Image: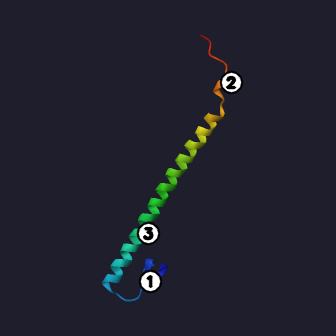
């Protein structure tokens, strides 16, 4: 299958070439989607890490503000 995706398929059957181009485009689309999802996951992981830092601060033991 890798050879088909890279264009090493023998013959010049137009249906085969069209399918190969379609598969190459699909692979490219999936790679783009994967990159986008990985970036989104990294951002969410950073936000979750920040939330854990804020949760680790015990507000009940903090001194009250002067009024």
Relative depth, front residue between 58 and 1: 58
Foreground pick, 6 / 43: 43
Of circles 2 and 3, the one toward us is 2
Say which of marks 1 and 3 sits in front. 3
Residue plotted at (55% across, 50% down) = 42
The Cα atoms of the two marked residues, 1 and 3, are separated by 16 Å
Q: Residue at x 38, y 78 (%)?
A: 20
Up the image or down, 11 lies above or below 63; here it is below
Q: Is residue 22 above or below residue 15?
A: above
Q: Which residue is mark 2?
A: 61
The residue lying furthest to the top in this view is 67
Instruction: Tell me the residue at 37%/75% (across/down).
Output: 21
Q: Is residue 7 above or below residue 51?
A: below
Which is closer to the viewer, label 2 or label 1? 2
How crowded pointer 3 is (Cα within 10 Å; few <14, some 14-19, many 20+) is rated as few
Query: Do callouts 1 and 3 mark residues in contact (Cβ within 8 Å)?
Result: no
**Which residue is label 3 attached to?**
27
Residue 24, how many percent across, how many down?
41, 72
- Extreme-bottom residue of the structure: 11
Residue at the disc numbered 1? 8
Mark 2 or mark 3: which comes first in sequence?
3
Label 2 Cα crowd, 10 Å radius (few <14 / some 14-19 / many 20+) = few
């Amino acid at each position: 299958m890798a050879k088909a995706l890279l264009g090493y398929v023998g013959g010049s059957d137009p249906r085969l070439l069209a399918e190969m181009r379609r598969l190459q485009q699909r692979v490219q689309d999936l790679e783009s989607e994967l990159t986008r999802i990985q970036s989104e996951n990294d951002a969410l992981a950073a936000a979750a890490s920040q939330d854990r830092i804020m949760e680790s601060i015990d507000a009940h033991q903090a001194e009250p503000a002067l009024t």
